[in-house]
Image (cartoon, rainbow, N blue to C red):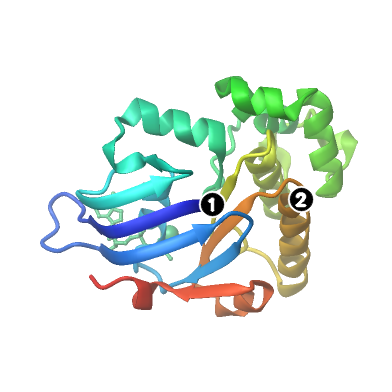
Amino acid sequence: MNVIELRELRFRWPGQARAVLAIPQLTLQAGEHVFLRGPSGSGKTTLLNLLAGILKPQQGELHLLGQPAHRLRAAARDRLRADHMGVIFQQFNLLPYLSLLDNVLLPCHFSARRRQQAGNVQASARHLLAHLQLEPALLQRSVTELSVGQQQRVAVARALIGRPELVIADEPTSALDADSRDRFLELLFHEADAQHSTILFVSHDARIARHFPRVLELNEVNQA
Ligand SMILES: Nc1ncnc2c1ncn2[C@@H]1O[C@H](COP(=O)(O)OP(=O)(O)OP(=O)(O)O)[C@@H](O)[C@H]1O
Ligand SMILES: [Mg+2]
């Protein structure tokens, strides 16, 4: 099954003279790990926001898990994201007034499906956090007290809880040294594979490419 299928997709930011994205065709199949590389300003975050349903293309087709997202209203796109996608944002978007554990549980509050798939949500969150090497002693702490590397792992646990079919990650390794980056990717892949999640990972950092079986250059995919 195709998890993502784009056809003749165009997106232009309001007030801009030309489109930032014009992608004739792009397909990701279930279970794939795909790395999409592109320089700063090339449209990576814009593309992920389209895939997450936060933005809507002005032209073309965007099928997510067989659903025509380009024809759905914002509320339906939000539902699709909440039920089926784990998103690791460029700035993590962790909620500072919540504990580490409550940040991880958040998707289960917004989606009955994610809650159901997680089973015992508390146990599932603790399991993911343990596998991501975050100690139980940290779980009730505020996320503001965590290091950047720890915050990244919280963001991964939050993206993976409730077994979403698609995980999209926006440059989450940019603040890590090489060793931590490699370990972070190993943990992400291990947990995503255990639950058969497809991964689309974007970054400007070409050194990450060797960890992925499929590598795409945004400048080749994008004709804008
Ligand atoms: N909210 C916005 N309004 C108008 N233009 C925007 C907006 N967000 C991004 N852009 C423009 O779209 C283009 C692509 O931006 P985008 O953030 O997608 O790039 P990126 O590849 O994610 O860059 P980086 O590697 O720096 O994160 C840039 O030219 C940017 O100025
Ligand atoms: Mg970006």
Residue 97: % across, % down: 61, 26
The C terminus - image quarter: bottom left
Q: Quadrant of residue 74?
A: top left
Quick check: is the Cβ at mark 2 less than 8 Å away from ligand 2? no
Disc 2, SS: helix
Indicate the amino acid at tag 1: Met
User: From where the camera sits, is residue 167 visible?
Assistant: yes
Q: Between 10 and 134, which is closer to the camera in this rendering?
A: 10
Tell me the residue that label 2 is attached to. Answer: 191
Residue at position x 39%, y 72% in the image: 218
Indicate the amino acid at tag 2: Glu
Picture layout, residue 189 above or below residue 55: below
Relative placement, left or right, of 102 versus 53 is: right
Q: Quadrant of ligand 2?
A: bottom left
Disc 1, SS: loop
The residue carrying pointer 2 sits among few (fewer than 14), some (14 to 19) or many (20 or more) residues within 10 Å by Cα, namely many
- Of badges 1 and 2, nearer the viewer stands 1
Relative placement, left or right, of 13 versus 170 is: left
Picture layout, residue 49 above or below residue 179: above
Q: Between 221 and 145, which is closer to the camera in this rendering?
A: 221
Tell me the residue that label 1 is attached to. Answer: 1
Residue 86: % across, % down: 58, 42
Residue at position x 80%, y 22% in the image: 120
Residue at position x 60%, y 20% in the image: 112
Q: CA distance from mark 1 to mark 2?
A: 21 Å
